[in-house]
Amino acid sequence: AIYDSIAGLPRNQSFDFIIVGGGTAGNVVANRLSENPNFSVLVLEAGSSPEGLLNYTVPFFGQFTHVVPNPRDWNYTTIPLPGLNGRAPPFPRGRLLGGCSSMNGMQYDRGSKEDYDRYARISGDPGWGVNLLFSTHSFCLDNSLIRWDALQPYIRRNEHWTPPVDNHNQTGQFNPTVHGFHGINAVSLSGFLFPIDGMIQQVTQELSDEFPFNLDYNSGSPLGVSWSQATIKHGKRSSSFTSYLGPEFIGRPNLHVVLNTQVTRIIQTSQSPVTFKMVEFAESRKGATHLITATKEVIISAGSIETPKLLMNAGIGDPTVLSSLGIKPRVNLPDVGKNLSVHTGVSLGYFVNSTDTFDDIFRNLTVRKILLDQWLATDGGGRLSASLSGHTVFKRLPSNSSVLAVHADPAAGPNSPHIQSGAENGLLNPLPEGHFISVGATLVTPTSRRSIELNTTDPFDNPLIKLGCLSTNFDIAAIREGMKSALRFIGAKAWDGYVLGPVNNITTATSDADLEAYARAHAAPNGHVVGTATMSPRGANYGVVDPDLIVKGVRHLRVIDASVWPYVPAGNTQASVYILAERAADLIKVAWE
Ligand SMILES: Cc1cc2nc3c(=O)[nH]c(=O)nc-3n(C[C@H](O)[C@H](O)[C@H](O)COP(=O)(O)OP(=O)(O)OC[C@H]3O[C@@H](n4cnc5c(N)ncnc54)[C@H](O)[C@@H]3O)c2cc1C
């Protein structure tokens, strides 16, 4: 059941597993653990439910959920970012049931096979849970042991491939052999064919060397131009809330989800062995605090920003830093909050010779209402059934690129992209007058690393969010090359007569210095942030969790969310989090069943 507050929870009940955060990962774990009727599961979620709210249901309206401040968001602002000219962009993150999966852009891409192979290599665990005693970063595994193939069952358990709402013929738009048709979370092609989709397909023929068509970016080899896939079910958002806590699951008598309840501290329950099985929680800063102890495990699934905050407030982190804040150090793990890695993207606008664009939806309430009426009348149909982009481009810097001549290649392997891009029915900020589309360049192999740090020890205060965005020479050089590639894409003849000219005076004649200046002035971090509680080999003296995701040196405390990935995958992160959580739930079952 789902309770709006702690008052609804049945009294005197004990729970085997307490999950902190009913977000993307947390709800997967809650679902899988409660499959076992002998396990009782409690999820504590700080935010409320998005049930029935159009902005969290109508795919296109997801754009409006990113406007902060908003009561279903954590309303973070980053600290001024040196790589972005000292700007401090707002940094939206879902504070609601389903977490970021309830408000994200819904793009579903898994990253490359090589991303997962790298996770296996650097965690020293080909199977996350085959407890191999590797202790160095440089240890290389035999290729045959590597993870992408072994992760396929978890990918398929997550994914429920769903026909697009307009039921268009999907032949040639995806590869069914790489998808799951019986999983829990809906994934589909866009339910709406965009006017620009045909021109993008033409670009793949005209400039096939640089922008070849790739039938399916989720095959493990994402390079090229593919039709985009999204977590959308018949024109409605599919989140970890609507799927993993769907009606067929939420009635389980052993599954309890409490909303509007923030875990304020994780509490040590034994010194030897070091054990953390208790959580403190409250409904508001001034509300009463309560304590509850798990009989088996506490699982932190609070996401890449709040998870390190919870760990540090529990005394798990760098002892010097914790002491300086007045927190008693309990577990010496200096990497808590460090190693933060995030994608950074920049958009270029192009005026077009058409009124059939999406910009009016943002500025014209009448247009919005007509489309919403259509969506309601068709139960999820029409333009609002889609997110922004029909296609996605994944691109490597060329092997002879001057950037790779002077910088080590940070990609997970030779078949992994550095840049994600494509033409979108865009959203530019500020919104220009007129009709436009946008092309973008997002750096998906950032080398910048920064951190989450405590600002105060009040659990209701936001932490200091320090993002690396474009603060290394590689990152700025790579995004500049990504912008040039985007300019070549939009310069194709396929756009003749449609694209009128740039919104921001950026053209192929723009100098490197001016491209860099534009990126620093306009780029922004996106929500793909990982690394603040990284996994490392068992026994390693760095990292935060072991490959089975148990906090190092601690019993009964696991972290299962995006924070454990040591590198950000070369693609949007939600699919990787679903995969991670599916596998992690299995590890827990194996440990306790
Ligand atoms: C604006 C935006 C757009 C994005 N677009 C895409 C996209 O198109 N495609 C894609 O693949 N990825 C996208 N992402 C990224 C993706 O959604 C995330 O990487 C992923 O959902 C993170 O999952 P998680 O489980 O780690 O954290 P979350 O989903 O954030 O879950 C954490 C949950 O824990 C709760 N919580 C935190 N602290 C506490 C506490 N102390 N007590 C109780 N509850 C707590 C939070 O409220 C939240 O519900 C986007 C992210 C954002 C922010």
Image (cartoon, rainbow, N blue to C red):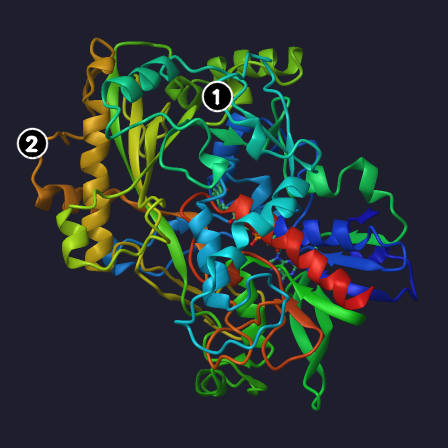
Q: Amino acid at mark 1?
A: Gln
Residue 509 got which mark? Answer: 2
Say if 378 sits above or below 409 in the image.
above
The picture places residue 232, in percent across and down from the top left corner, at 59, 29
**Residue drawn 59% across and 11% down?**
374
Q: CA distance from mark 2 to mark 1?
A: 35 Å
Position of 566 with respect to 271 (left or right) is left
Say if 311 sits above or below 192 in the image.
below
**Residue drawn 44% across and 58% down?**
118
Q: Is residue 95 visible to us here?
A: no
Q: Quadrant of the C terminus?
A: bottom right
Say if 154 sits above or below 422 in the image.
below
Q: Which residue is mark 1?
A: 173
Quarter of the view holding residue 301: bottom right
Position of 196 with respect to 117 (left or right) is left
**Residue drawn 65% across and 11% down?**
378
The picture places residue 19, in percent across and down from the top left corner, at 71, 61
Disc 2 crowd rating (10 Å Cα; few below 14, some 14-19, many 20+) is few
The picture places residue 300, in percent across and down from the top left corner, at 64, 64
Decide which of tag 2 and tag 1 comes sooner along the chain. Answer: 1
Q: Nearer the viewer, residue 239 or 310?
A: 239
Q: Is residue 39 visible to us here?
A: yes
The picture places residue 20, in percent across and down from the top left corner, at 68, 61
Q: Are marks 2 and 1 in contact (CB under 8 Å)?
A: no
Q: Nearer the viewer, residue 357 or 581?
A: 581
Report the number of discs.
2
Q: Nearer the viewer, mark 2 or mark 1?
A: 1
